[in-house]
């Protein structure tokens, strides 16, 4: 886990310093088109967000077109819906779209300093919004694990206190209802 965390930190740092946008790749190594990145924009570890994005991806119009559209005019069908497939073939786009839907649950964006030091982020939920609180709690716990060994211990300990505080607001029985 330390190596993966370190790679995430290095990638985020290089990206921030160079201003370069590092492409997101599918498990098969294909670049995810910008039009599909919206399905991968959940915070680290937020299972509630990921579940919602997976559902949206699997029920999206582009995927419906990919599965049920006439292969001979697939490009036209996607274009008519305003779907930008960039410079790839419609068949490649459809395969990548399916891959993206399948990778949402396991994908996490690179760890950035904001996850560690912008602690206000973890308190952005309304008091009664248990789904939001659970999402923030899940994010906080995974970020804490990624933090340890990659950031100052004092910062990680502060984050753990925040996680525990958020977790104490969310009852375990309530979490079952959310998921």
Image (spheres, rainbow, N blue to C red):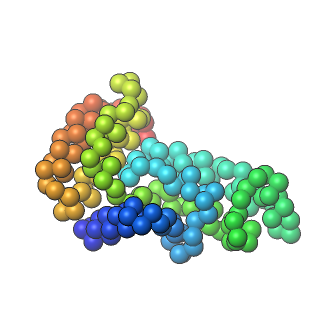
Say above or below: 99 vs 57.
Answer: below
**Any part of residue 92 in sight:** yes
**Any part of residue 8 in sight:** no
Q: Residue at x 53, y 44 (%)?
A: 52
Q: Residue at x 19, y 51 (%)?
A: 156
Task: Give the residue furthest to the front.
Answer: 18
- Residue 34 point in image, percent of width and height: 60, 59
Say above or below: 42 vs 8.
Answer: above
- Residue 94 point in image, percent of width and height: 69, 65
Say above or below: 18 vs 128.
Answer: below
Q: Find residue 15 and report its image quarter.
A: bottom left
Residue 127 vs residue 150, the one in the foreground: 150
Residue 124 vs residue 65, the one in the foreground: 124
Q: Find residue 88 and report its image quarter.
A: bottom right
In which quadrant of the rendered image does the C terminus lie? Answer: top left
Horizontally, is 121 left or right of 72 in the view?
left
Horizontally, is 44 left or right of 81 in the view?
left
Q: Residue at x 67, y 50 (%)?
A: 60
- Residue 48 point in image, percent of width and height: 44, 43
């Amino acid at each position: 886990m330390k190596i993966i965390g370190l790679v995430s930190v290095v990638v985020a740092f290089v990206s921030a310093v160079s201003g370069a946008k590092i492409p997101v790749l599918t498990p098969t190594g294909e670049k995810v088109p910008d039009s599909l990145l919206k399905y991968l924009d959940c915070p680290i570890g937020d299972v509630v967000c990921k579940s919602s994005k997976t559902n949206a991806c699997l029920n999206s119009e582009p995927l419906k077109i990919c599965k049920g559209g006439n292969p001979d005019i697939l490009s036209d069908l996607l274009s008519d819906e305003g779907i930008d497939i960039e410079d790839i073939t419609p068949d490649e786009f459809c395969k990548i779209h399916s891959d993206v839907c399948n990778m949402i649950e396991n994908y996490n964006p690179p760890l950035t300093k904001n996850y560690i030091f912008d602690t206000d982020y973890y308190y952005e939920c309304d008091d009664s919004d248990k789904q939001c609180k659970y999402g923030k709690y899940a994010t906080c716990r995974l970020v804490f694990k990624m933090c340890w060994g990659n950031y100052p211990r004092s910062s990680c300990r502060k984050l753990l206190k925040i996680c525990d505080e958020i977790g104490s607001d969310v009852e375990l029985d309530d979490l079952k209802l959310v998921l």
